[in-house]
């Protein structure tokens, strides 16, 4: 799995604080430290709408279709996902769930290879990619781009980083959090993704 930050709102903390200060007419108090302190307060008070002014865009590769299905349930984020209708995906790997070990994982790999060979055969027979893909397992790798504002990103990381979430999406959340803590520590420093 690879999670890359493609783009983030420049000076996001300063922008969020500046927007928040409009409501109090306290623009004169701006400084990096004061901005961070203000953002921490806003989050504590639940005044999170100002976090919507900043956005991040991630490229997420090598996750399963199962994980992508979970991620794309987040309606306030925007997505573009590699299309199995248009792209030949015969070389995509099977994502390895850590619980599948030894002989069981070998069996899963054999099944994936059979599915891959059938996929190839279907394409050779002239079946469109959009129909041939039906024989591929849900663990097949995909890639997508996700854009979310900071408020939604906090929501996704909190929900998908919790122990109740599955290991794969939890790992996506962990990596997103790691990247966002560097970009906007005051917005993301209170979040944790449990191992
Ligand atoms: C551990 C776990 C298990 C899950 N299991 C299942 C399952 O078995 N089956 C299943 O179908 N899904 C399951 N889900 C998905 C879950 O039901 C949500 O669809 C998904 O987490 C998106 O969350 P959300 O709706 O809060 O967030 P988003 O879509 O990201 O929305 C963010 C927030 O905006 C607000 N919002 C967005 N749209 C609306 C709206 N139309 N009306 C009112 N408020 C809105 C809500 O406050 C929402 O929390 C699971 C999720 C988790 C984390």
Image (cartoon, rainbow, N blue to C red):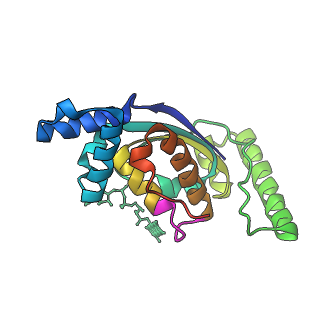
Q: Is residue 70 in sight in this rendering? A: yes
Main secondary structure type of the part rendered in magenta: loop
| Residue found at x 73% / y 42% | 125
Quadrant of the snapshot with the C terminus: bottom right
Total of numbered circles in the picture? 0
Image quarter of residue 109 = bottom right
Q: Which residue is drawn at 51% across and 56% down?
A: 69
The residue drawn where x is 18% and y is 32% is 27
Q: Can you give x and y, in whole percent of width and height, for residue 45 in the image? A: 24, 58
The single residue placed furthest to the top in the displayed view is 10
- In the rendered image, residue 59 lying in the magenta stretch gets the answer no
* Residue 83 visible in the displayed image: no
Q: In this view, does 115 lie above or below 11?
A: below
Closest to the observer, 56 or 127: 56
Residue found at x 46% / y 57%: 191
Quadrant where ligand 1 appears: bottom left
Q: Give the range drawn in magenta.
A: 159-166
For this view, does 150 lie left or right of residue 126?
Answer: left
Please, is residue 79 above or below residue 103 in the view? above
Which is more toward the observer, 49 or 129? Answer: 49
From the top left corner, tell me how far across and down residue 50 is, in percent: 25, 44
Locate residue 19 relative to residue 74 in the image: left or right. left
- Residue in front for this viewpoint, 123 or 107: 107
User: Residue 10 appears at what percent x and percent y?
Assistant: 40, 28
Q: Position of residue 178 (x, y in %)?
A: 55, 47
Residue 60 sits in quarter: top right
Image check: 18 left or right of 177?
left
């Amino acid at each position: 799995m690879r999670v890359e930050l493609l783009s983030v709102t420049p000076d996001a903390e300063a922008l969020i604080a500046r927007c928040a200060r409009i409501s109090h007419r306290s623009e004169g108090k701006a400084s990096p430290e004061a901005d961070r302190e203000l953002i921490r307060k806003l989050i504590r008070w639940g005044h999170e709408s100002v976090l919507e002014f900043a956005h991040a865009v991630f490229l997420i590769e090598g996750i399963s279709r199962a994980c992508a299905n979970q991620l794309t349930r987040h309606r306030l984020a925007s997505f573009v996902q590699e299309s199995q209708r248009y792209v030949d995906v015969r070389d995509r790997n099977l994502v390895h769930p850590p619980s599948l070990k030894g002989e069981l994982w070998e069996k899963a790999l054999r099944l994936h290879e059979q599915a891959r060979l059938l996929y190839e055969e279907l394409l050779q027979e002239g079946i469109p990619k959009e129909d041939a893909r039906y024989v591929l397992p849900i663990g097949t790798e995909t890639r997508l781009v996700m854009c979310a504002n900071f408020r939604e990103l906090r929501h996704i990381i909190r929900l998908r980083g919790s122990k109740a979430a599955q290991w794969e999406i939890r790992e996506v959340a962990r990596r997103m959090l790691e990247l966002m803590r560097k970009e906007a520590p005051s917005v993301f420093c209170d979040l944790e993704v449990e191992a």
